[in-house]
Structures are given as structure tokens and as C-alpha cells.
Amino acid sequence: MRTITLCILIFTCKGIAQSTAVADSLYATGNYTQAINTYATVGNTASNLQIARAYNAIGNYDKAIAQYEAVVNKDSDLRISRLELGKLYLKTKRYNDARKLFTKLVSDDNTNPEYFYYQGEAFRELEQFSSSLVAYKKAINIDSTHLRSLFQLGKYFMVKQENLQALEYIEKGLAFYPNDVALINLKALGHYNNNDYRQAIPAFERLLIMGEEKEHVYLKLAHSYYKEWEFEKAIKRYKALLEMDDSVSEAYNGLGEVYIKAKQLDSAEMNFKLAIAAQDTDLSGEYSSLAYVARQRNDLKTALEYYKMAYEEDMTNEMAYFQVCTVADQLYQDPKVRLAYYEEFEKKFKKKHPFFTETVEKRIRELQEEIHFADN
């Protein structure tokens, strides 16, 4: 009898091993549905975990979560299943469930930086940012090279415009991962947002070398060259972007600004007009730029028309209408005509902008006196 029992046990173990091997092969080759069916014939914890993974792989997240939860409830010491379940909670936006799970995990094991990182992710998604920062910092205290935690800390402080603190974490990450594109991009943005264009330039250039030929990289790199008075390099980068996509109005605007600084007014005018042609949204900025070019040429009539067009594009733009008044003041001889513009400004924007209001009120008094003395 003992021999028969032993034989049955041996055959059962062999059958489980064979079924597991077949299921593992099906899983490895992406035949997940067949793998699930085969794992189901085994019925142990390891096969149940594989069923959860297979459901996750095919995108059936509800069944994957149910299967993971069954495994965790049966064997709560199996931390890999808890980690994978927590990540799936995050993926399916069940952030509070993820928070609870990872908080329990870090309580059970406070030596694993991944647990703290994912706890930070759950807090971040719940907009509990102070708690997320604590979790990310604990992750890098355990592992100073934990890239994703360093990135999230750098990104957080970048968004808060605390650029120096952001750069501190970014540089720590780059010390270990010098070719990480996301960190290099953050570094470039950190220097750019801090108006440190000289430091931003090499980081943006490196992104281009690494194949990150994206619109924002070209625009910010070109603008950085412009701010550093390296006009030829700025022009080169703007033009490179326009060769990729000739509908980027910001590139034409950028070229226009460069050409103004370089005293090439014809080229500036042409690019501002191309910017207008490239977009159908608010064109007040482009019309104001064209007005500025005309004013530099002392073509006050054209400047006035463009400033009026800028105001018509955005009738809340007090700067545009203030420029209408000042150009009209220069253009027209009749003080009554000039006065009418300033009085119209006062009607539209009184008390909205202290500097403009004060200047306009002063000019109104001067023109009224001029008219009074002229009439007498």
C-alpha cells in the first residue's frame, strides 16, 4: 500500500512538473490564453501567480487584479506578488489601493528602494506631494543611484521653479547615468528656466546629438543662442526646425526677433509675416512685432495699422492699445486727434494698469493744456 501511494505521489509530481513546463513555455512565447488554461490545471501558488501575470500581459486587468489579490490573500509573505499588484493598481489608477499596499510593504521591509519609489508614485498621483517627496528621498537614501526617484525629485522642484534644488538632484542622477535623456532634458530646462542660457546650450545640443530632435529642444536652444547674442547659431537652429516642419510659427517669430537684434529689418518683417501665415490663433504678438519693425523704420502709419490689428486680435491687451496711442501721438499733428486716442484708452483700461494709466492721464492733461492755449 505504501508503495502504491509513493508511486501515485511520484506520478502526480511528474504531472505537475510537466504541466508547469508546458505552461511556462506557452507563457514565454506569448501564448497567454493557453498558458492560463495550463497553469489552471496545476493549481499551486506559483502557477496562480503566473495566471495573474498572463492576464496582465494580455491587458485583462480586472482578472489580473482579482488573481493577484487571491494570491496575496493566500500568501501575504510573497512580496513579489504584492509588488506586482501594487504596480497594477497604479497602472489602473487605483491610487489609494496602491498607497495602502506600498505603505504596508515599506513597513514590512524598509530596505527596498523600489517599495519607497512606488509608494512615492501613489502619493504623487493622489497629489499628496509632501509625502511623495519623503518616499522618493527614502528611496535614494537606500540607493543613491535610484534613477527614477532622482528624476521625480528633480521634476518636482523644476515644476515648483526651484531650479537650483532641481539641478542638485539632476546632477546626482547624471553622475551615475550620464546618457539618460530624461535627466539631460531636465538639466537643460533647469538652466533655461533659470535664465542661465550659457549652461543650457550644451545640454540642449547634447539632446540633438542623441537624436532628440524635438520642437521644444530646437526652440529653446535657438532662443538660448539669441539671448547670448550668438545670432548666426540661433538662426541655424530655427531654420533647422523649419526644415523639419515649416508650420512652426514660434520659429518664425524667433527668427524675426533675431533679425531685429541683428538690424536686418527686412528679414525680420518677412519672418513675422510667415509666423502669421503659419497660424490661425491669436496673432496680436505677431502684429505687435511687425508694428515694432515699422516703427524702427520710422514708418508710423504702418506701425499704427499693425498695432490696431494687434489690439483687434486681443481686445484685453492694454499694451497694444497703449502703443496705438503713442504712435498716433507721434503721427498726427492735431492735438485733438491725439487726445481722442488717450481718452479712449482711459475709457477702456482705466485703473487696469497703474503705469499705463498714470502715463495716459499725464498726457491727457498736457494735450488739454495745449488745446486750451491754442484756442486762446
Image (cartoon, rainbow, N blue to C red):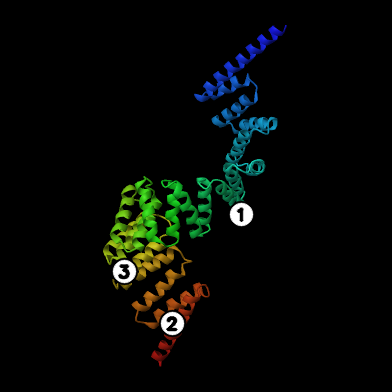
Please tell me whether residue 241 is drawn above or below residue 288 in the rendered image.
above
**Residue in the image at 33% along x and 57% along y:** 274
- When asked about the image quadrant of residue 363, the answer is bottom left
Mark on residue 294? Answer: 3
Query: Element type at marker 1?
Result: helix
First-in-chain label (2 vs 3): 3
User: Which residue position holds label 2?
Assistant: 363
In this rendering, would 178 be left or right of 78?
Answer: left
- Does the rendering let one see residue 326? yes
Query: Element type at marker 2?
Result: helix
- Image x and y of residue 373, in percent: 40, 91
- Does the rendering let one see residue 253? no
- Image x and y of residue 124, in percent: 59, 49
Query: Element type at marker 3?
Result: helix
- Amino acid tagged 1: Ser
User: Which residue position holds label 1?
Assistant: 130
- Amino acid tagged 2: Arg
Please tell me whether residue 277 is drawn above or below residue 115 in the rendered image.
below
Please tell me whether residue 361 is drawn above or below residue 114 in the rendered image.
below
Which residue is at the front of the view, 125 or 287?
125
**Residue in the image at 30% along x and 63% along y:** 259
